Image: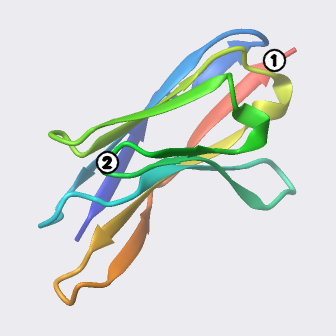
């Protein structure tokens, strides 16, 4: 059973920074794609950023230039460095990992979510 453990959320003032971490455990294989989604109150869950095992990255337009995603494959851990935070970045941030099953298919696993609140 693959588990994702997130950390690093909290309260920060506008213009500040936070770093989220998410460690995967319990998988036979290292995750393929890892990344982050977020969901603000009353809104749908949206992609923030993803990174492949080969370190190819993808960002939502709203965070380009402010957020940086990275990963440590040896630790099966993904990070999200968030700079120049804005109140509209306030949301619950969810870690994801696409993990290969024994049948060869990829299953998406979700973390429990961590709250990020940016005050104006």
The spot of residue 58 in percent (x, y) is 57, 46
Relative depth, front residue between 87 and 61: 61
Question: Crowding at label 1, few (<14), some or many (≥20) Cα neighbours within 10 Å?
Answer: some
State how far apart marks 1 and 2 are (Cα): 35 Å
Viewed as shown, does residue 5 lie left or right of 40? left
Which quarter of the figure is the C terminus placed in? top right
Q: Picture coordinates of residue 83 (x, y %)?
A: 64, 16
Which marked residue is nearer to the observer: mark 1 or mark 2?
2
Q: Which mark is residue 54?
A: 2
Precedes in sequence: disc 1 or disc 2: 2
x, y percent for residue 52: 39, 52
Would residue 90 be seen by someone viewing this image from the given angle? no
- Residue 60 quadrant: top right
Q: Residue at x 79, y 12 (%)?
A: 14
State which quadrant residue 85 falls in.
top right
Considering the numbered disc 1 on the image, is that residue within a helix, a strand or a loop?
strand
Q: Quadrant of residue 18?
A: top right
- Reading the image, the residue beneath label 1 is 119
Quarter that holds the N terminus: bottom left
Colour setting: rainbow
Under circle 2, the secondary element is loop
Query: In this picture, is 63 found above or below 45?
Result: above
């Amino acid at each position: 059973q693959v588990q994702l453990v997130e950390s690093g959320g909290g309260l920060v003032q506008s213009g500040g920074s936070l770093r989220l971490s998410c460690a995967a455990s319990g998988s036979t294989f290292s995750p393929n794609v890892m990344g982050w989604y977020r969901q603000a109150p009353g809104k749908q869950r949206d992609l923030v950023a993803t990174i492949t095992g080969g370190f190819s990255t993808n960002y939502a337009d709203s965070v380009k230039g402010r957020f940086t995603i990275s990963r440590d494959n040896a630790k099966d851990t993904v990070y999200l460095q968030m700079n120049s935070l804005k109140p509209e970045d306030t949301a619950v941030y969810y870690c994801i990992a696409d993990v290969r099953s024994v049948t060869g298919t990829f299953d998406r696993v979700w973390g429990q979510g961590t709250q990020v609140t940016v005050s104006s």
